[in-house]
Amino acid sequence: MKDRTYIKDLRDHVDAQVTLFGWVSKARATGKVSFITLRDGSGLCQCVLEKNDVTAAFYDEAKKCPQEAAIRIRGTIFAEDRAVGGVEMRDVTEFSVVGNSGEYPITPKPHGTDFLMKNRHLWFRSQRPWIVLRIRATIVDAIRSFFNDRDFILIDTPIFAPAAGEGAQNLFEVDYFDEKVYLAQTGQLYVEAACMAHDKVYCFGPTFRAEKSKTRRHLTEFWMVEPEIAFADLDDVIELAEDFVCAIVRRVLKDHRADLETLGRSIDVLENAVKPFNRITHAEAAEILRGPKATELLQTDLTTKTARVEEIKAALSETEAKLSGGGLKAWQQDKLTAEVNNLREEMGELEVEIENIPHHIELARNFDDGGDLGGSNETIISRLYDTPTFVTHYPRDCKAFYMKQNADDPTRVNNVDLLASEGFGEIIGGSQREENYDVLLKRINEEGLSQSDYEWYLDLRRYGSVPHGGFGLGLERTVAWICGLKHIRETSAYPRMMGKIYP
RNA sequence: UCCCCGAUAGCUCAAUUGGUAGAGCGAGCGGCUGUUAACCGCUAGGUCGUAGGUUCGAGUCCUACUCGGGGAGCCA
């Protein structure tokens, strides 16, 4: 298979003969011309076969080629404005089937989520999921390059963890030779130890949460990258996070502009993700939430969403009247029915949102200064600004034991969360770590954790303890934000969620 | 754990107050020289999620269960 050209390179082969290998993504045939849209690992290309003396030997076979059959095809590349991608293959001289295809379950028509998830192994051949997984791969590469280029050392932290960090109810328990261990929910404590050896380190791998949440923001298995830096305070951590997120976004904009447009992602929103990001403290966030701005935002939401529902209702009755009016071709009926279904789906979502708004208003108004930000509050804060927003200095009592107590206000810690714009939620959580032995030990005891589990961790404060800190970035939430996906399951090739383990 | 919605052909969906189960796509066959979800004609394809109940009669009504979707709580 040496003589093979990839579709992404076809612009360099105009007027030349090439051989393509790939899968039939779409096929249409007329009497004497048939069109095959071919997909290889690099893109899509339309191949046009005309029935003539040259093609007689294989024309009928090619014409009957079903969706997703794997083929080899040789022909000449022409510049062609009518074809997607600007080039197409004509004057085909050779054609063969590498692997035939049966009745392919995923058709060009719409499918339901359940069906698509059960066919995830096939679904990601389709255009949108195909693009999303490519962007994910680019983001992973951007993450690795960012840290490697800055002399961070990669440390792989264990997935079997002996002790529960913070409360065992959201961890997966594993039988480890008759001993109870847990699947890691973070590599942070381990990466802190490595930080004292290498100064700048990061880990990047899967983490697990047994949270019984069935929402569009949760997976039970997801990837997290966690850098840790020595001789650093909270400001250093925030600066690193800011540079990091900017670098990822810039890389995706550079490599995937056309893909983002295909996904329908607003490029402007991503271009707004430049330094400096917006920065507020938890206390300021609380004030905003309880103040008129938050309520106003939600009231406006309520008005626009209610108006949209009325609009949809009008459109629905109009379309339904057209449908029952008769005199339509079958395909017109099909199209109108699809429109009706889309409208109904949108209306259903809006109605749930409208129902929740009063609750969210109450949550914001009565926000407790001593508590964590809830999901709806995060959404409110992030939607008030164009750039991603850092929220710092949360109350000590709602955060993990290892976070550095604030010097001016001991009820707060030097931590930071980064909220992605447009209500996509928290993509980063980080902090300066408590480097003082006595304070850390006191916190471990206060949280009711067993000191013996953390002796090794306390050692870091016994031998050359320095101010240090880091953060964790959730890969899937970042991909969802950058691609503008409303559901996190689409960011992973094989998403694991509550009640979902196949394929 | 709680609340709302759903389950009918391989897929997406219809089926009027309870009265013979339908369409499009996909599949198969035929036609058409430029298609972009092509088009035109024909063919095949169903224990209406499971188990009970009401009724002369249940896809339709009732109960329980299973599975799925969305949300709340909880969380990163």
Image (tube, coloured by chain):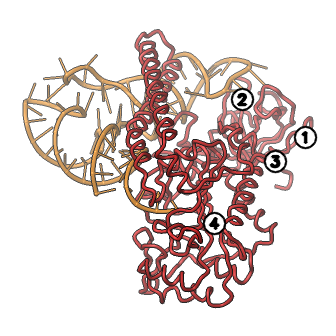
Chain colours: A red, B orange
Three-letter residue code for mark 4? Phe
To the question of a shared chain for discs 1 and 4, the answer is yes
Whole-percent x and y of residue A27?
66, 33
To the question of a shared chain for discs 4 and 3, the answer is yes
Q: CA distance from mark 2 to mark 4?
A: 55 Å
Q: Classify residue A392 by image quadrant.
A: bottom right
Whole-percent x and y of residue A425?
55, 51
Q: Nearer the viewer, residue B61 or A169?
A: A169
Q: Could you tell me if residue A191 is visible in this image?
A: yes
**Helix, strand or loop at mark 2:** strand
**Helix, strand or loop at mark 1:** helix
Q: Earlier in the sequence, mark 2 or mark 1?
A: 1
What chain letter is assigned to the residue under label 4? A
The residue tagged 1 is A13
Q: Earlier in the sequence, mark 2 or mark 4?
A: 2
What chain letter is assigned to the residue under label 3? A
To the question of a shared chain for discs 1 and 3, the answer is yes
Q: CA distance from mark 4 to mark 3?
A: 40 Å
Position of A488 with respect to A15 (left or right) is: left
What chain letter is assigned to the residue under label 2? A
Q: Is residue A475 above or below residue A387?
A: below
Q: Earlier in the sequence, mark 2 or mark 3?
A: 3
The residue tagged 2 is A34
Q: Classify residue B39 by image quadrant.
A: top right
The residue tagged 3 is A6
To the question of a shared chain for discs 2 and 1, the answer is yes
The residue tagged 4 is A471
Residue plotted at (54% across, 85% down): A438
